[in-house]
Image (cartoon, rainbow, N blue to C red):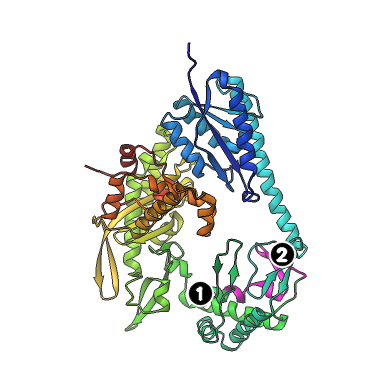
Amino acid sequence: MTKKIIRCAIYTRKSSEEGLEQDFNSLDAQWEACRAYIESQKHEGWKLVDTRYDDGGISGGHLERPAVQSLLDDIDAGRIHMVVVYKIDRLTRSLADFARLVERFDKADCSFVSVTQAFNTSTSMGRLTLNVLLSFAQFEREVTAERIRDKLAASAKRGLWMGGLAPLGYNPHPDTNTRELVLNLDESKYVQRLFHLYDEHRCLGTVTDLAEREGIRSKRRTFKSGKKLGGCVMSRGAVHSILTNPVYRGMVRHKANAYPASHPAIINEALWDRVQEALITKNGRRRGQGGSGTSDRAPLTGRLFDEAGDRLTPTYANTRGRRWRYYVSRRLMKGSVSSPAGWRLPAAKLETAVATAVVNWFETAPQHLLSDPSTERFGKVQSAFADLSQQMMHRQAATLKQLVQRIDLRPGEITLTMDRDAIAEVTDLQPDDLVSGSMIHVETFAQRKRGVETVLILGAETPSRDETLIKAVARAHDWAEQWRAGTSLSDIAKSIGWTTSPLRQRLKLAFLSPAIVQAILEGRQPADLSLEKLLRTDIPLDWDRQAKVLGFELA
């Protein structure tokens, strides 16, 4: 009697990218060990599939990994019967994720094996062994994180530079083993000039304008990949960051504390103290004049972004003794307000529109919110949301600040991302009780122009071409063609200055069905379909299932 063929997939993972550029790296070593194990089980009908599932430079503390998602898609489709890993912590280091994986494996009649740890997932003792192993793996990850945090704090107290990008005026020490900054003489003159300008004018806007005229630019950086950044005109925020950075008086900063360091100071103590006192005095005067903080007058501050990723900043205009508030794309504040490439929205009307969208989310969210629904939990959520809807009428600003984490605007669509921890707190639940994907709410709207202002009217369907999404799909097809022609993914990633992880994640867009691609080109995609949502979604290879999962109604 012919033995049943057991199709085996090998999954490999490495937390850091160190060494992945080598011809034979850790992922290859894991794969070879697993392949040898599968070869030893040939008599049981085990057969290795052609596809490799490698995640390089990605933590095992979560499942947002391209190769894992691709593996799960193939398991759900019945193409994989056995997953082989070198060690169980290569698959996951989280007990919660492991429980979800086992449940998903069971539904697809799939098992998995660790070649260096003997267990059988089909028995209760085997599952107990796995749970014990994973408990230690999770413990090891948490202890490692604590150890790193303690080491950073101890290094800062000793005055050592803790790594990261060197600030303007300094370079990292040429000896990578020396945790110290060295002076960049040319850039240090820029820093000194900024401090002297502020000491003279006491106005960030004036200093920023003068710095631009004098040719003071942000630090130029060249990365190992060859990618270059910096050398740009500095914004008010960038100038403020330099003026308040204690590194320039010979200190290193760790969280809220600063410690004496061994690198040379660029700014003397007297000038530093004058500038800090002026900054504090000016900020204090503004708060006192307004009677409340900026975030109270503009509750969407720091949460609002346009389709280009540009933050919308609160501003105001005074007309006939009355103040009119707006949220304006930051690039418009630096140029012409008539530019078509940004937003200028009346603040009160936008806040009301966002509040309406939040209330709409209150009405629809409960049925999708709970990861493990029960009558008691569902009742808690409904009761809490009913109270919040009433609260929104009387304390709109405070409620928006508490619950809304991010707001993304693009023509015809507003996307809210709710704060999961805040929602858990108001519903008296744990964050893990809530489905993270349910925190996103999308509303369509129509735009009405009033002069240079744009007013949003929720509820209008305005399908339009998403150029960001179209560009991402086109690039994915281009990369797929290079890959089919024999170019390795690592070479493609290097050519665009990426690592292979984000490249693999976006490459799946090349496998969307022609009908879906045509709909995207014509702007007929679902209102809530964005590039971010596509990258988060497990996209099946079957075209009909793709349409169903992504919400397309195709003829």
Name the residue: 46% across, 70% down: 294
Return the residue nearer the eye: 30 or 380.
Answer: 30
Q: Give the left or right position of residue 43, taking residue 147 as reference.
A: left
- Evaluate whether residue 134 shows in this view: no
Q: Which numbered tag is attached to residue 161?
A: 2
- Element at label 2: loop
Q: Does the magenta stretch include residue 320?
A: no
Residue 325: quarter of image: bottom left
* Residue 416 position within the rendered picture, expressed as x and y whole percent measured from the top left: 39, 55
Looking at the image, residue 187 lies above or below residue 148: below
Quick one: label 2, few (<14), some, or many (20+) residues within 10 Å?
Answer: many
Q: Amino acid under label 2?
A: Trp
Looking at the image, residue 369 lies above or below residue 48: below
Q: Amino acid under label 1?
A: Arg
Residue placed furthest toward the left: 555
Residue placed furthest toward the bottom: 200
Residue 463: quarter of image: bottom left
What span is colored magenta in the figure? 241-262
* Residue 457 position within the rendered picture, expressed as x and y whole percent measured from the top left: 26, 61
Residue placed furthest toward the front: 485
- Evaluate whether residue 57 shows in this view: yes
Q: Distance between the residues labelled 2 and 1?
A: 35 Å
In the rendered image, the quadrant that contains the C terminus is top left
Quick one: label 1, few (<14), some, or many (20+) residues within 10 Å?
Answer: few
Q: Which numbered tag is attached to residue 395?
A: none
User: Number of labelled discs?
Assistant: 2
Q: Answer whether labels 2 and 1 touch (C-beta < 8 Å).
A: no
* Residue 526 position within the rendered picture, expressed as x and y whole percent measured from the top left: 29, 49
Q: Identify the residue position indicated by label 1 in the image.
A: 287
Name the residue: 53% across, 79% down: 285
